[in-house]
Amino acid sequence: MTNLRFNVAQLLRENIGAQRYRQFQEDRLTLDDVLVLRDIQGEVRFTRSASGVFARIWATGLVRLVCVRSLEEFDQPIELHVEDEFHSIIDVVTAESLPTPGEEDPFLLDEFHMADIGEAIREYTLLELPLSPVCEAYRDHPVSYSVQSEGADDEANEQGIDKRMEILKSWVDPRQSEN
């Protein structure tokens, strides 16, 4: 259980546009089976909307990743700016069930009118992570890859040109094909 759940029941009783600010700190948030977001700090602004609350979340943290160049672990800083709506599933005044929103995979307030911004932070952090993480030490170093095939030197002539490609030279220089 995290401290990233906020009760917005009182805000749901107010007019559309009413706001609440909250700051938060959390030691860790599990992202998946391997990754963990650590040292999370931030703030959230909830704004009453027609179907629930609109959350504007600013958060920072660190994720331990493996560098694709050095294969060493390093801490990747994460900075999130999330804006998403949390829809009510139960009317706060009448306690009647509300229709589910039409959008695909919405964030929902639970039956106690709690907004779990931890789930929003988890999902948006996974989207923010680099596909090929590179640690700071290797970020500004260009990488050159070379492929060496066995026997390739045997087929090259003394000028370093592959004999199989000689015919292509005639397309580039038509005068050479006359010789």
Image (cartoon, rainbow, N blue to C red):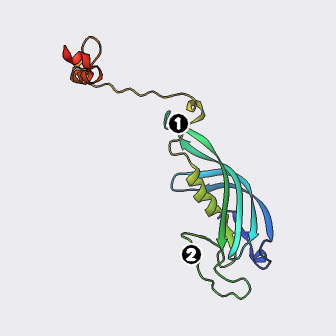
The earlier-in-sequence mark between 1 and 2 is 1
Q: CA distance from mark 1 to mark 2?
A: 44 Å
Query: Is residue 172 shown left or right of residue 164?
Result: right
- Residue 151 visible at all: no
| Dot 1 alpha-carbon crowd within 10 angstroms: few under 14, some 14 to 19, many 20 or more | few
Q: Is residue 66 above or below residue 20?
A: above
Residue 102 circle label? 2
Q: Quadrant of residue 2?
A: bottom right
**Relative to 21, does residue 27 appear above or below in the rendering?**
above
Using the image, determine if residue 82 lies above or below residue 177.
below
Mark 1: amino acid: Glu
Residue drawn 57% across the image and 56% down it? 31
Q: Residue furthest top?
A: 158
* x, y percent for residue 168: 25, 24
- Classify mark 1: helix, strand or loop: loop
- Asked whether 167 or 176 is in front, the reply is 176
Residue holding disc 1 = 72
- Say what secondary structure mark 2 lies in: loop
Counting from the top left corner in percent of width and height, residue 5 is at 69, 67
Q: Residue at x 54, y 27 (%)?
A: 141
Q: Mark 2 packing: few (<14 Cα in 10 Å), some, or many (20+)?
A: few
Q: Does 149 appear above or below 18?
A: above
- Could you say where residue 118 lies in the image, as x and y percent from the top left? 64, 62
- Which quadrant, please, contains the C terminus? top left
